[in-house]
Image (cartoon, rainbow, N blue to C red):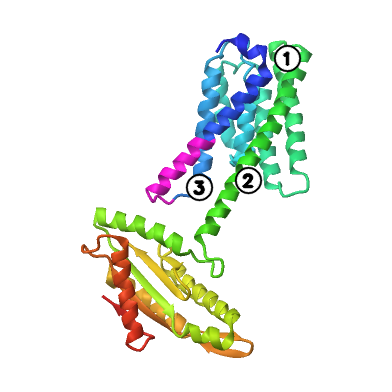
Amino acid sequence: MTWSIWRVSPFISGVFFILGVFTLYQVMYDGLKTVLRAKKIKVDEDKINSYFGVIYMGIFIISMQATIVGTPVSWQFMNFQLIALVFCAYFLNIHVPYYIFFPIMVAYMFFNGSLGYWESWCHGVTLVAYYSSLNIIRRRQHSDYPFVAYILSGAFFGSLLWFFMLIKFDLAWSTLFEELSYFIIFQVLLYSYVTMILRDSKLKLHLLEFANHDALTKTENYAAYVTEIRSLFDLSTKNNLHLSMMMFDIDHFKHVNDTYGHLAGDKVLRHVAEIVQTVIDENDPTVKLFRTGGEEFNVIFPGYDLPSTEPIVRQIFMAVNHSDVEVNGKTISLTISVGVSTISQADLEPNDFYARVDGNLYQSKKNGRTQITAN
């Protein structure tokens, strides 16, 4: 792309360029998350977002600067560099200690051939101050007017930065006001665009959570169970890994509903789910609880053979069986019946595994309830 095209319509070119850069970032980041989830790699998504964002923006800035370094028009991409800084400091909220900036600033000025210019040193110090101020504004974004602080900060530091460019490259004042106007417009567009993307992402996460979680007990539901067991079953059979499952239901739950009412039944379900989840959290967070039916729950144990499940299964069994629920001044005593089994070579699909666990639960109920059947 020639310089003449950029200068014919710098605003339109800049808008499409910036939106394209950040759209590509979002696509690549979403793709990276998809790959990590598919491989069952558990990572801190905030850290991945930060590291990936810094690497991506670093490549973006260096690539642009390499095309114009040492030329009399090396100031023309500064707005894009500022927007990259805004993206990392404000939207990714990446905290960088101030002392880390100095070697980065020196290395960049060496690369850019500007170590001998006092204007470049002032420019670098101002960039550090701008980055730090954006971090502070982001941490206080729950104030009444976060957008105003965001824009005013950009206007103030942008004016300083372009003033140093004006002196260093002997630019016209009209150029300064033009480029500063573009920068502020780019800031507004970026704020609107990223806010829209984040709002859409939050909505998708909310809908996904709603689709995969039981509204009453807050545990994952049958749809989530089906997805999880298919994935773990395939992984376990292909790699000869252990996989076990516990199934339990609340004894005489229909009697609770008929005697005390459905609100009491709902309270019992929530109470049982909280107890079981507490036991799981204290032992192994990789173990997952699902509400798969009315009073029926499944607990999946990835990587567990049958003997390994016994301590957690016993804790769950004893914790629930020694708990009571108070409803309208009346005490409801709770017990559960349990079935446990592990995956076998005879299982051709997840339902074969499920049927065996379900059969063990049926045996516990048939033999008098409030017991564990495992094989």
Left or right, 255 with respect to 7, comes to left
Residue 78: percent from the left, percent from the top? Answer: 64, 21
Principal SS element in the magenta part? helix
Are the residues at dot 3 and dot 2 in contact (C-beta closer than 8 Å)? no
> Residue drawn at (57%, 25%), measured in percent from left and top?
106
Amino acid, disc 3:
Glu
Q: Nearer the viewer, mark 3 or mark 1?
A: 3
Q: Earlier in the sequence, mark 3 or mark 1?
A: 3
Q: Judge by depth and name the residue closer to the eye, 238 or 170.
A: 238
What residue is disc 1 on? 167
What residue is disc 2 on? 199
Amino acid, disc 1:
Ile
Left or right, 84 with respect to 142, comes to left
Distance from the alpha carbon under mark 3 to that under mark 1: 43 Å
The kind of secondary structure element at disc 1 is helix
Residue 83 versus residue 43 in the image, above or below: above
Label 1 crowd (10 A; few <14 / some 14-19 / many >=20): few
Q: Judge by depth and name the residue closer to the eye, 99 or 374.
A: 374
Distance from the alpha carbon under mark 3 to that under mark 2: 17 Å
Residue 17 versus residue 144 in the image, above or below: above
> Residue drawn at (59%, 31%), measured in percent from left and top?
102
Residue 245: percent from the left, percent from the top? Answer: 34, 68
Residue 334: percent from the left, percent from the top? Answer: 48, 85
Numbered marks: total: 3
Label 2 crowd (10 A; few <14 / some 14-19 / many >=20): few
Are the residues at dot 2 and dot 1 in contact (C-beta closer than 8 Å)? no
Residue 81 occupies which quadrant of the picture? top right
Distance from the alpha carbon under mark 2 to that under mark 1: 41 Å
Are the residues at dot 3 and dot 1 in contact (C-beta closer than 8 Å)? no
Q: Earlier in the sequence, mark 3 or mark 2?
A: 3
Q: Which mark is residue 45?
A: 3
